[in-house]
């Protein structure tokens, strides 16, 4: 009992520190693009633990009464995470009291009462069952898979056969099994395409991949060649960065944010921008030597360092977009993009 109380107090203390780190964005100087990255890579919290503590820290920033309730065990992290999106200045005391010492299921019930979800759309019921699906043989026989299964995933002994099923006019359900390598490529494509496919929809990425593949195959079949263009003179005095320079910088920086903080180099590979080490507005040239890749958070951070904090608007706080990219944070990121000066 005493140990559990000690653990609760330690967690509450950690959450209080995260509130401070978050409000002052201290993680940026540490070389992390978000508080989530800081929690997982520097504090070595699991993704789940980091998510819960950050959600609690942000809720406690709005409603400081949460911290003592966490410390004395009236509320646990799961409860706070479930309630946080629904707390308002009007209802928070009432809701927090109602949720005290309640189980997860009871808190979910409470949330459903205050924020009822609409019924699932009826169109789901009209979907054909898999029985009428047209089965396509899997490309790879099971015995040729040499890779060990991914540790976190429980794979079936034999891969599911691919399914291509018409769901509705113009809509198809395509389901197939891929190797870990292919899955890695998908995740990489999702990161690189965040600007244009914010929710990382595999269907949209599949479409783009096929478009490129078809162009490539058609080119081979038809022998069509794009007329190679001679290297144009580098417009180093312009803000526009020539494509050749972009390629060089991207390859040199390995497609990853090159900001180096107290805890080493940033690991962010999504939302990358070309950063002028000496700002363009300050006479910096658009040449490879003066350009580095930056994630959006660090590009803004350094612009703030150079020109003063008033120059840069707030970086969206809800950057919890590593695995479960919520739509709200994506919207915040895009809204931020619109206000962000490039460079
Ligand atoms: Zn970064």
Image (spheres, rainbow, N blue to C red):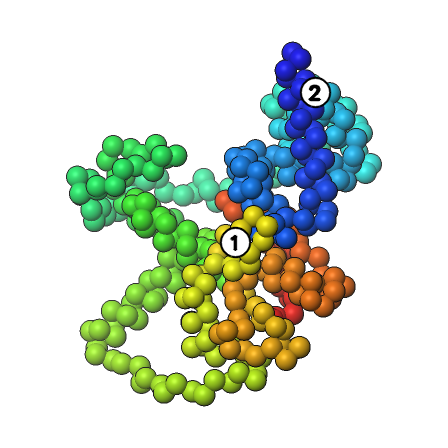
Decide which of 211, 7 is in the foreground and name it. Answer: 7
Is residue 179 visible in the rendered image? The answer is yes
Q: Give the quadrant of residue 225.
A: bottom left
Residue depicted at 67% across the width and 33% down the height: 14
* Quarter of the C terminus within the rendering: bottom right
Name the spot of residue 36 as percent of width and height, x first.
Answer: 58, 44
Kindly identify which residue carries mark 1.
Answer: 265
Query: Which callout, 2 or 1, points at the residue further toward the start of the chain?
Result: 2
Q: Residues within 10 Å of mark 2 (few under 14, many from 20)?
A: some
Name the spot of residue 192 as percent of width and height, x first.
Answer: 46, 59
In the rendered image, the residue lying farthest to the top is 1
Indicate whether 317 appears above or below 308: above
Decide which of 138, 299 is in the foreground and name it. Answer: 299
Name the spot of residue 278 as percent of width and height, x first.
Answer: 61, 72
| Left or right of residue 293: residue 202 | left
| Left or right of residue 117: residue 70 | right
Q: Give the quadrant of residue 171.
A: bottom left
Decide which of 115, 139 is in the foreground and name it. Answer: 139
Determine the CA span between mark 2 and mark 1. 38 Å
Residue depicted at 58% across the width and 71% down the height: 276
Residue depicted at 20% across the width and 73% down the height: 221
Name the spot of residue 6 as percent of width and height, x first.
Answer: 67, 19
Indicate whether 93 appears above or below 291: above
* Quarter of the N terminus within the rendering: top right
Kindly identify which residue carries mark 2.
Answer: 73
Is residue 116 visible in the rendered image? The answer is no
Indicate whether 321 appears above or below 272: above
Q: Disc 1 on helix, strand or loop?
A: strand
Q: Residues within 10 Å of mark 1 (few under 14, many from 20)?
A: some
């Amino acid at each position: 009992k005493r140990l559990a109380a000690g653990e609760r107090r330690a967690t509450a203390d950690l959450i209080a520190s995260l509130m401070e780190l978050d409000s002052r964005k201290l993680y940026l100087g540490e070389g992390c693009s978000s508080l989530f990255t800081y929690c997982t890579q520097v504090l070595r919290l699991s993704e789940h633990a980091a998510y819960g503590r950050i959600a609690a820290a942000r809720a406690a920033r709005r409603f400081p009464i949460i911290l003592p309730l966490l410390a004395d065990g009236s509320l646990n992290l799961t409860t706070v995470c479930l309630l946080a999106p629904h707390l308002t200045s009007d209802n928070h005391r009432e809701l927090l009291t109602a949720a005290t010492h309640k189980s997860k299921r009871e808190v979910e019930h409470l949330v459903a009462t205050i924020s009822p979800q609409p019924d699932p759309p009826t169109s789901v019921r009209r979907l054909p069952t898999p029985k009428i699906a047209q089965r396509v043989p899997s490309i790879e026989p099971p015995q040729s898979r040499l890779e060990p299964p991914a540790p976190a995933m429980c794979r079936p002994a034999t891969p599911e056969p691919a399914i291509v099923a018409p769901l509705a006019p113009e809509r198809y359900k395509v389901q197939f099994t891929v190797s870990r390598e292919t899955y890695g490529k998908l995740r990489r494509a999702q990161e690189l395409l965040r600007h244009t496919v914010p929710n990382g929809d595999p269907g949209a990425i599949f479409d783009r991949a096929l478009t490129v593949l078809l162009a490539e195959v058609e080119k081979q079949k038809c022998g069509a060649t794009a007329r190679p263009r001679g290297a144009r003179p580098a417009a180093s005095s312009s803000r526009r960065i020539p494509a050749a320079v972009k390629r060089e910088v991207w390859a040199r920086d390995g497609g990853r944010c090159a900001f180096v903080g107290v805890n080493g180099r940033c690991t962010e590979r999504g939302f990358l921008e070309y950063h002028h080490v000496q700002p363009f507005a300050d006479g910096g040239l658009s040449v490879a030597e003066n350009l580095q890749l930056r994630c959006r958070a660090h590009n803004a951070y350094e612009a703030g360092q150079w020109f003063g904090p008033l120059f840069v608007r707030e970086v969206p706080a809800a950057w919890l977009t590593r695995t479960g990219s919520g739509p709200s944070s994506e919207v915040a990121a895009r809204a931020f993009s619109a206000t962000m000066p490039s460079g």
